[in-house]
Amino acid sequence: MEVPSSQIEALAFPNPASDEINIDISQIHEDGERRIRVVNMSGQVFIDRIIRGEGNVLTIGISGFKPGIYTYQIYNAESEIVNGKFVKE
């Protein structure tokens, strides 16, 4: 039995991070276009882009981000699939 996507929790590592954050997306089995959005605690969007290709880990460069707490959402056209937080050192 497949776990409903609403119960999947993506894992961001290393956390805290300084140069790159990796998000484990191996449990996401959604068809169609997927996007990722990274937002700081003030609501400023830093990344909003299509996730391309296959794989188990999504790597995002964050070296240009200011230190702080960021949230991420991975979603498709219908709804949010997963979300989480990470700390930029």
Image (cartoon, rainbow, N blue to C red):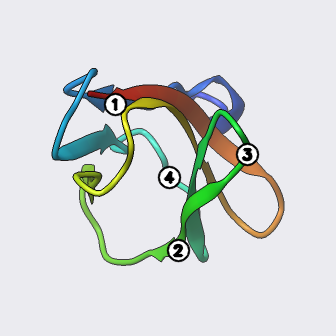
Estimate the x, y position of residue 73 in percent, counting from the top left: 61, 46
Element carrying mark 3: loop
Element carrying mark 4: loop
Q: Which residue is mark 4?
A: 29
> Which of labels 2 and 4 is toward the front?
2
Q: Which residue is mark 3?
A: 43
Element carrying mark 1: strand
> Which of labels 4 and 3 is toward the front?
3
Q: Which residue is mark 2?
A: 49
What is the distance, in whole Å, between disc 2 and disc 4 at their CAs?
18 Å
First in residue order: circle 4 vs circle 1: 1
For the point 33% across and 41% down, the residue is 23
Q: Which one is nearer the viewer's eye here, 17 or 77?
A: 17
First in residue order: circle 2 vs circle 1: 1
Q: Which residue is mark 1?
A: 12
First in residue order: circle 2 vs circle 4: 4
For the point 19% across and 37% down, the residue is 18
Callout 4–callout 3 Cβ contact below 8 Å: no
Q: Amino acid at mark 1?
A: Ala
What is the distance, in whole Å, between disc 1 and disc 3 at their CAs?
19 Å
First in residue order: circle 1 vs circle 3: 1
Left or right, residue 60 beside residue 41: left
Estimate the x, y position of residue 51 in percent, counting from the top left: 44, 71
Q: Amino acid at mark 4?
A: His
Q: Is residue 61 visible?
A: yes
